[in-house]
Amino acid sequence: MEINKKDFRPAKQHAVITTGETIKMLRELKGWTQEKLAGHCGISATNISLLENDRLEIGKKRALQIAKAFDVHPAIIMFPEYESGEIKKAA
């Protein structure tokens, strides 16, 4: 069977990333534990875990604290579906 590239079109990106997934991804890309992130942002490791598992709302204050720890704009944390390209740059 011969494959002709003209018969195909590029797939569209449909992945949705949550705030919790973004936090976890940034943390892991930095090589940090939840405890280390907690130390950098002043949010307890328990709450970091809850945020990463989308069991706790982020809120403006927490988003600012986490963004500052990662040295990124808070929009990357609060609106990851719009800022996914910036997440990779931040790591």
Image (tube, helix red, strand yellow):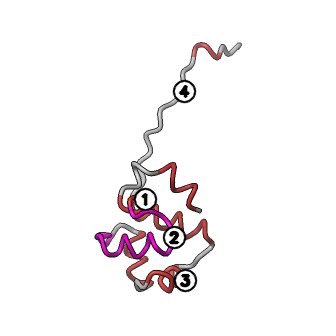
Q: Secondary structure at mark 2?
A: helix
Whole-percent x, y for residue 91 in the image:
59, 62
Q: Which residue is mark 4?
A: 10
Residue numbers of the magenta segment: 55-74
Which residue occupies the foreground of this view, 81 or 89?
89
Distance Cα–Cα, label 1 vs label 4:
26 Å
* Residue designated by label 1: 76
**Residue placed under numbered mark 3 in the picture:** 36
Percent across and percent down for residue 16 are 41, 48
Label 4 – label 3 distance at C-alpha = 40 Å
Disc nearer the start of the sequence (4/2): 4
Identified by mark 1, the residue type is: Ile
Q: Position of residue 46 (x, y in %)?
A: 41, 83
Residue depth check, mark 4 versus mark 2: number of the one nearer the observer: 2
Task: Look at the image and say whether residue 63 sits in the magenta stretch.
Answer: yes
Q: Are marks 2 and 1 in contact (CB under 8 Å)?
A: yes
Q: Residue at x 36, y 70 (%)?
A: 63
